[in-house]
Amino acid sequence: MPKLELAKRAVIAVGIGRGFVVEGSREKLCVITAAHCLPRLPPVKPTPYDPEEVTYHNLLGRLGEPQTVSAECLFADPLADIAVLGEPDAQRPSLNHQNKAYRGLMPDEPLSIGNMPKEYKPKLIKTSEGELIEAKSNHESLTTEAWVLSLDGNWFACEVK
């Protein structure tokens, strides 16, 4: 299967928009999307939360198909308009079947963001005033080619840093 077709499988419907599947911590697959695609923002609480409060039912689906899969909101920032979704808590009996549906929706291969280093350490230089600043050449080395799926379903190349 061509690389672009594999990448397209990693793009899924999320509410009123789309998201893309990436590999998160501990090899779990997460969905990155715009926060405005969520039906509501998760509650902000300093105390432990009930997973049901941050689980959105019938939120995910394959592009062009009904959205029947639930997801748990792991992170949302309404100002940056970004959200990270993960699998519903399999330990809770009420969410166990939704966890299986989430895993079944995930593609064989997550979207590859680029060939960025695992750990970014900026190269610092000292100015004549003694101030430490980041060297520009280090930023240039972190530029890579990426592909973006347009709203009409076509891929186009771009550079990302």
Image: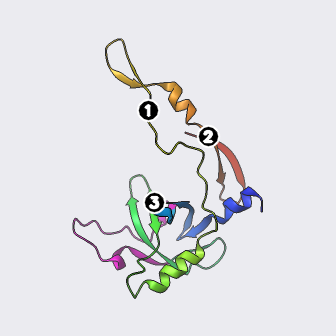
Q: Which residues are magenta?
A: 32-58
Instruction: Determine which residue is flagged by label 2.
Output: 144
Asked whether 154 or 143 is in front, the reply is 143
Q: Is residue 70 above or below residue 30?
A: below
Instruction: Tell me the CA gap for discs 2 and 3.
Output: 22 Å
Whichever of callouts 2 and 1 sits on the residue coming sooner in the sequence is 1
The answer to whether mark 3 and mark 1 are in CB contact below 8 A is no
Query: Quick one: quadrant of the C terminus?
Result: top right
Query: Quick one: quadrant of the N terminus?
Result: bottom right
Magenta stretch: residue 76 in it? Answer: no
Q: Is residue 127 above or below residue 64?
A: above
Q: Give the quadrant of residue 132.
A: top left
Instruction: Determine which residue is flagged by label 3.
Output: 25
Asked whether 147 or 79 is in front, the reply is 147
Whichever of callouts 3 and 1 sits on the residue coming sooner in the sequence is 3
Q: Residue furthest bottom?
A: 93
The residue at the point 39 percent across, 88 percent down is 93
Instruction: Tell me the CA gap for discs 2 and 1.
Output: 17 Å
Q: Label 2 amino acid?
A: Thr
User: Dot 2: within a 10 Å radius of its alpha carbon, few (fewer than 14), some, or many (20 or more) residues?
Assistant: some
Q: Secondary structure at mark 1?
A: loop
The residue at the point 40 percent across, 77 percent down is 89
The residue at the point 46 percent across, 24 percent down is 135
Instruction: Tell me the CA gap for discs 3 and 1.
Output: 23 Å
Q: Label 1 amino acid?
A: Pro
Instruction: Determine which residue is flagged by label 1.
Output: 122
- Give x and y (percent) for residue 126: 37, 18
- Give x and y (percent) for residue 115: 60, 44
Q: Label 3 amino acid?
A: Ser
Q: Secondary structure at mark 3?
A: helix
Whichever of callouts 2 and 3 sits on the residue coming sooner in the sequence is 3
